[in-house]
Amino acid sequence: MKDNLKDQFKEKGKQTVEILSIGTEILLGNIINTNSRWIAERLSELGLNHFRQTSIGDNLTRIREIIQECSLRCNLLIITGGLGPTPDDLTVEAIAKAFDQDLIEKEYLWDQMLEKLTNKITNKNNSSLRKQCMFPKNAEIMNNPRGTAPGMIWQPTKNFTIMTFPGVPSEMKEMWNQTASKYIKNNFSESNIFHSNTVKFCGISESSLSESIDDMLSSKNPTVAPYANLGEVKLRITAKAKSISKAQEIIDPVKYKLKHKFPKQLFGENDETLASVIVDELKKRKQTIVFAESCTGGLLSSTLTAVPGSSEVFKGGIIAYSNEIKNTLLNVSMDQIEKHGAVSEEVARSMAIGAKKHLKSTWAISISGIAGPKGGTQEKPVGLIHFAIAGPDKTLIFKKMFNSIRTRREIQRLSVNECLNNLRLILLSKKN
Amino acid sequence: MKDNLKDQFKEKGKQTVEILSIGTEILLGNIINTNSRWIAERLSELGLNHFRQTSIGDNLTRIREIIQECSLRCNLLIITGGLGPTPDDLTVEAIAKAFDQDLIEKEYLWDQMLEKLTNKITNKNNSSLRKQCMFPKNAEIMNNPRGTAPGMIWQPTKNFTIMTFPGVPSEMKEMWNQTASKYIKNNFSESNIFHSNTVKFCGISESSLSESIDDMLSSKNPTVAPYANLGEVKLRITAKAKSISKAQEIIDPVKYKLKHKFPKQLFGENDETLASVIVDELKKRKQTIVFAESCTGGLLSSTLTAVPGSSEVFKGGIIAYSNEIKNTLLNVSMDQIEKHGAVSEEVARSMAIGAKKHLKSTWAISISGIAGPKGGTQEKPVGLIHFAIAGPDKTLIFKKMFNSIRTRREIQRLSVNECLNNLRLILLSKKN
């Protein structure tokens, strides 16, 4: 099978890359491998698709073996981790063993290292740090401006290069930006880069969206890939081209088509959120908004105020968790609460109207429901949420029944999404 | 080399596990692979060290090949991702191809799936979701209580079992907890298990904590590992033993020591949060709390109301983003706001007192500050936050200057932590 792999990957004339993360802490689940994601993103920007990421523990034999495997499969192997001074840092030794080479001390590195250290080393010759100066004879050294362990660039066999980085993210990133990026670009990058735009949808499921754009999903350039989050679906449109502006020219027609096909569901791009889109829209109209929240307990306000500049449109809110506060601050009558219950369209309507009036705004949204895990009844189960949006002309009421297997937090989040999306649709249908 | 691997791993009588994550979005660096870390942690708790984690893209041939590789190397392969309805979801097809098997539709799954869907499917027979009912003939189905795509447990060859999970973390975790964990424990776990407790600290840095417990950090059983989050530090204490109760006996003395060494900073364990600790404490005292938030815009309320049962102690809150609302709802005089500015200890004090009085509670917390990125001045820069806690006897005011390189959201989160921790310390020093 190895030979198959060799045929498949290496003989096509296309440069291929793999990422190898070394560290038992990854296999134990003690840390999350953020390095691989960061490097993957950089490779993608350089137009280098890589086909595989592997994580492996601090074990000499297993590291050696996987490096041998990779040497048959790819042209460039990016390794992070295992460059430190402790006995379980085995990366460089394993690399040398994989190609039957010895390690040689690069003495000038030791002098550089001593200069970097703020704490005096008492026993220079026996310092464990000295290990970090050992490299295969022909390896090129990559300076590590933020730490003691240097990296290397080494080509042990034809068409196979290894680059090593420390596992500490800040050191790895600095070395990448200062040295590695340029080296990879000059030696491995083809003339093309990858560039992506993300478009975001609300009010349509991933499967419905995918079914109605299956022509796009099978397109090769740009590629279009769907992802689902809680309450929203995204499409990532990625183009391969000579430059970012050329890539954007490939992406734009697809975005244009999507905007026309889903005028209501497509709400934004890239860093935009439902909340930021609403803040922008209200800013344009010079309108203000307030909230009256019950079961979401501040999450709606918190979502909107996470947007920088939201203070221009958001005046404030009332979190009316108790019926008493619904009555005193939002003017919901106790009669109404007793007759219909706090979770009812009548109370939701009164809350929104009360908030709009008391806090003097163009718009008010209210939410009252049962987020769980307790508090549900047969008639009003966990997941039942009533909403009202009071606007300049009228008050819209609506309700939603979220699946009760959802956690409390998920029901709160979906409720926030639901009312923000409804407000967005109202704004969309209303010129000012 | 494959045969070497086979010798090395499979013939030793030790059960070995690998994790395979499938999804081009991982290779493009679009998402971070949190699933592998979570599963790695669970495997470690079950006493199953695994030797390798791999991520690979949505490519039929490459998925098939790596599954064949893994079948020679390990006894249990945990796969996440690629179970969805879209054309790039290829996991099950690739698994079947790896062992020359056909896929067969499990019809009862389709009926279950239709029941789960709240939106009507217009064209039942052509729905892309139908694909999710196709499995190898002898595969055992793992129910997915939170989504439509079921997983499977399948043993295609002797001593090799595959388990599949969706890539959506919440679905994967629920399936793991409900079904997979028990199955793996019964079929793959050896006599020793790993068991962990996490203890959580606030008001001490990771480095100070680590320096004062370096004896514990070098202990072998239990191991103690520090992690830092925004505004809190955790220690994970992990013991290896024959049973959970034996492991707990190893962990307890360490926990006891820590509690006595850090009586003020150690605030909770495992799933506890600052907010849940406060909710529990107020419940015990039958006391209530309200909030008056300015720059945190609802995040304080939202953090407390994320705790199930918080409605017993939380009456509500006022998000006074505008000065007008500070005046009308919290009774802060316009004179005071003009004289000292909205971000001042005087206004913070008045906000807390106003909230406590208006909303009739035992405790009230207020926050007023500059979360940025704009709005800072030389005198009152971004990151300056004033707090007040009004209690049964008196009102405490304090301020904090967070580093202005923090993002808006980080400053909001740190502010919430700061006042919750201060309230916790007040409660700690006060019997009732």
Image: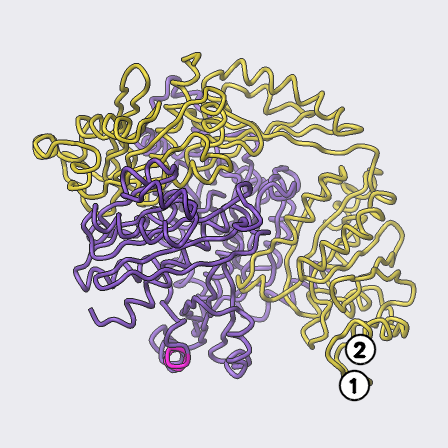
Chain colours: A yellow, B purple
Real-space Cα distance between discs 1 and 2?
7 Å
The x, y position of residue A263, in whole percent, is 49, 16
Which part of the image, by quadrant, shows the C terminus of chain A? top left
Q: Chain of mark 2?
A: A
Query: What amino acid is at disc 2?
Result: Arg
Q: Are marks 1 and 2 in contact (CB under 8 Å)?
A: yes
Query: Which residue: 20% across, 53% down?
Result: B361
- What residue sits right under mark 2 in the picture? A130
Residue furthest to the bottom: A123
Counting the numbered discs, the total is 2
Query: Which residue: 88% across, 60% down?
Result: A140
Q: Which mark is residue A126?
A: 1
Q: Quadrant of residue A399?
A: top left
Within 10 Å of the Cα at label 2, are there few (<14), some (14-19), or many (20+) other Cα atoms? some
Q: Is residue B391 left or right of residue B145?
A: left
Within 10 Å of the Cα at label 1, are there few (<14), some (14-19), or many (20+) other Cα atoms? few
Which stretch did the figure color magenta? Answer: B255-261
The x, y position of residue A408, in whole percent, is 30, 45
Q: Reply above or below: B63 against A64.
A: above
Q: Is residue B81 left or right of residue A408?
A: right
Q: Reply above or below: A154 against B369.
A: below
Query: Which residue: 66% across, 58% down?
Result: A169
